[in-house]
Image: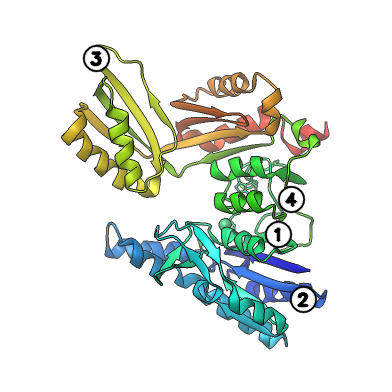
Amino acid sequence: MLVVQKYGGTSVGNPERIKNVARRVARTRDEGHDVIVVVSAMSGETDKLVKLAHEISETPDEREMDTLISTGERVTIALLAMALKDMGYKAQSFTGRQMGIITDTAHTKARIEKITAERVHDALKEGKIAVVAGFQGITAGGDVTTLGRGGSDTTAVAIAAALKADVCEIYTDVDGVYTADPNVVPNARKLEKISYEEMLELASLGAKVLQTRSVEFAAKYNVPVHVRSSFNDNPGTMVTKEDREMEAVVVSGVTCNKNEAKITLVGVPDKPGVASRLFGAVANDNIVVDMIIQNVGEGGLTDLSFTVPKTDAKKALDLTQKINAADIGAKDVSLQENIAKLSVVGVGMRSHSGVAAKMFDALANEGINIMMISTSEIKISCVIDAKYSELAVRVLHDVFELGVEQVAA
Ligand code: ADP
Ligand code: ASP
Ligand code: MG
């Protein structure tokens, strides 16, 4: 078998933990499997590098940012390969470049275009364990790129897809995928399995246990992903194709995302072309817009709000102000950063009604105001004040009876 394993930041957070990972990898090798291990930077290291950049520059150059933040993973591949060699195993570290992870040029959020993996095939043939740096790639022109925060998951799944691995194991600091973040909701329940589609929604709506792109890859290439703990041997959660059992569950999970900010234009002249000019320019700048709401116009004026990733908020605000001054003429443009997007997800929603009403009702009972709403076939999201986010997650988890003891009853 070819097994791809990925260990996150906490799992390689100090020398003792790196040695623990080495022992786990060695065990898999001893079982006779070929092993490719993908590692993240030690926990906190990427944050430290990002902070350092912001101490130098308010808006750090993105190419140089990638050169900087890709270094954390170079440290861990070297240390893990050393640990394995000390234990008597053949091992070799690979940077993104050495692994042939070719991406587009969208620095700090690059997409993997292909994986050439030439040298890794040779290494595996020689019986070596390949230790690959997560999160990083290289453009066709030779510049270092990174895949967005949490991107090591995507490195692992993409390698598993490209090399047709039998399984991709994501080792992290929790036992699997839960009905809500177990660090926020103490009675959250571990899911035995979850469909790609639900996982994709949960991930993109804030459950950082898997990076969204990694789930896209897994779904597209049908890679079975096993999310589990690096600190015990408990079975984790299988992320796989949807089956009948899954449909019976109306809500599988509750999640919350505090990584978005809201930009509001007040007093926008209500005439054709405004949205097209604004969002055209925003897209041109590679800023991904998530939710948009526009009010019914009154007296020829309307209000328009949209959300963008917090990391792009300054850039989006500057751009909106510029376009507004030149072209739109709204009375005011403002930025609100203390918002949270709260979501419930489940494939069972396709065949059950009343989920939205139940969600709005629960929030109203707590006096939590809803600023924006969006829905799809299998999810409902509300933007609320960030200060209520933890409370709101717990309330919804309870209302939809997702807790360990609630299911048991
Ligand atoms: P790693 O460093 O291993 O990549 P992350 O911190 O990126 O780990 O992801 C694991 C974390 O995801 C957990 O510690 C947990 O707090 C958080 N999380 C959020 N939502 C969920 C969920 N539904 N199930 C499991 N973990 C979740
Ligand atoms: N080290 C990177 C980050 O902190 C990538 C990862 O951990 O997946 O975002
Ligand atoms: Mg992660």
Alpha carbon of mark 1 to alpha carbon of mark 2: how far?
18 Å
| Tag 1 secondary structure | strand
Q: Which residue is located at x 58 percent, y 45 percent?
A: 203
The answer to whether one can see residue 400 in this image is no
Whether ligand 1 has any atom under 8 Å from the Cβ at mark 2 is answered as no
In this view, the residue in front, 386 or 131, is 131
Vertical order, 343 against 366 (above or below): below
Alpha carbon of mark 1 to alpha carbon of mark 4: how far?
10 Å
Alpha carbon of mark 4 to alpha carbon of mark 3: how far?
53 Å
> Residue 137 placed where, x, y %?
48, 67
Alpha carbon of mark 1 to alpha carbon of mark 3: how far?
57 Å
Q: Amino acid at mark 4?
A: Thr
Alpha carbon of mark 4 to alpha carbon of mark 2: how far?
22 Å
| Tag 4 secondary structure | strand
Q: Nearer the viewer, mark 4 or mark 3?
A: 3
Quadrant of picture, ligand 3? bottom right
| Tag 2 secondary structure | helix
Q: Are marks 3 and 2 in contact (CB under 8 Å)?
A: no
Upstream in the sequence, badge 1 or badge 2? 2
Vertical order, 117 against 82 (above or below): above
Q: Nearer the viewer, mark 4 or mark 2?
A: 2
Q: Which residue is mark 2?
A: 29
Q: Are marks 1 and 3 in contact (CB under 8 Å)?
A: no
Q: Are marks 1 and 2 in contact (CB under 8 Å)?
A: no
